[in-house]
């Protein structure tokens, strides 16, 4: 693993944790902050614990970092009160704060890249069209589950869930939330699929080189597990088949 990349990711993690603490110092509503940033409390331990065994592309780590910033800002102010949203509303002459739609755009954009990377590297889906279809289906499923969570929060908390829901009186808020997640997923696939594939190939090549036995030293040591290398290699093979470069 490149030392520069590792240093960059460690610094990003430290910055992320510092901003997370800062966002929780004096949030507008403590319960809303906890619910909004809760995905970060799940994602960070998972990403840290799997970094050595199955590292992700730098592109995906950066996108996850940006998504976390969106969540923290929404948690600190509540989505209906984020100052950036008011500025956008004034500029576009909107009747409501649209920051929640930015959040749902990222809810589609970043999970699309996560799902795509898992599917590509595991060689679970063959064919770029079927890959895109599966990614979009996964994103919409995640978005629907999130709406179920909001519904459950509304039933359990009653009026106390208003800040978390952030509907701002919009009767079509649920549908528009899922639509923005769909837009985010499509944008991610159109804009970043090529770069993600390039980074996956570099990551795969580096992993295969590290996994080769150190014959000169006579150790035969494999720094990565056979499971990890197998997954990376199968993803590389899938990409070769798709591009017609399979030997």
Image (cartoon, rainbow, N blue to C red):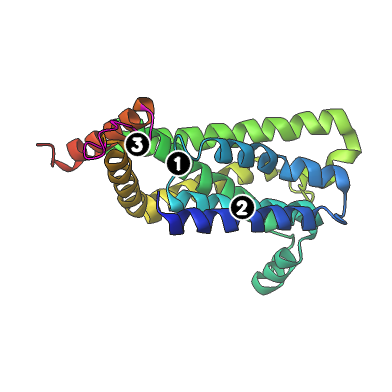
Query: Relative to the observer, which residue lies in front, 28 or 158?
Result: 28
Is residue 221 within the magenta segment? yes
- Residue 67, x across and y down, in percent: 60, 52
Say which label, 3 or 2, has the lower sequence index: 2
Camera-nearest label, 3 or 1: 1
Q: Can residue 225 be spotted in the picture? A: yes
Q: Which residue is mark 1?
A: 55
Numbered range of the magenta stretch: 214-225
What is the quadrant of residue 89 in the picture? bottom right
On screen, residue 229 versus residue 173, left or right, reads left
Circle 3: element type: helix
Q: Which residue is mark 3?
A: 120
Distance between the alpha carbons at the discs numbered 3 and 1: 14 Å
Quarter of the rendering occupied by the C terminus:
top left
- State the residue at coordinates (71%, 67%): 84
- State the residue at coordinates (20%, 38%): 242
Is residue 125 within the magenta segment? no
Figure disc tally: 3
């Amino acid at each position: 693993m490149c030392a520069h990349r590792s240093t960059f990711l460690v610094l990003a993690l430290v910055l992320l944790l510092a901003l997370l603490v800062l966002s929780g110092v004096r949030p507008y509503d403590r319960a809303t902050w906890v619910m909004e940033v809760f995905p970060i409390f799940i994602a960070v331990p998972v990403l840290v614990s799997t970094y050595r065994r199955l590292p992700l592309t730098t592109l995906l780590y950066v996108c996850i970092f940006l998504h976390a910033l969106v969540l923290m800002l929404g948690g600190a102010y509540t989505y209906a009160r984020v100052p950036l949203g008011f500025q956008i509303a004034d500029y576009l002459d909107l009747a409501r704060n649209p920051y929640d739609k930015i959040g749902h755009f990222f809810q589609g954009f970043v999970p699309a890249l996560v799902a795509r990377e898992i599917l590509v590297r595991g060689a679970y889906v063959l064919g770029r069209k079927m890959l895109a279809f599966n990614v979009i289906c996964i994103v919409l499923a995640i978005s629907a589950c999130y709406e179920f969570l909001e519904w459950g929060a509304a039933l359990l908390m009653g009026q106390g869930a208003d800040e978390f829901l952030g509907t701002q009186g919009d009767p079509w808020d649920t549908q528009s939330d899922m639509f923005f997640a769909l837009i985010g997923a499509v944008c991610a696939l159109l804009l970043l699929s090529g770069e993600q594939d390039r980074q996956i190939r570099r990551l795969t090549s580096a992993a295969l080189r590290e996994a080769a036995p150190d014959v000169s030293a006579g150790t035969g040591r494999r720094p990565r597990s056979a499971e990890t290398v197998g997954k990376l290699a199968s993803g590389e093979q899938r990409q070769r088949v798709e591009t017609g470069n399979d030997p």
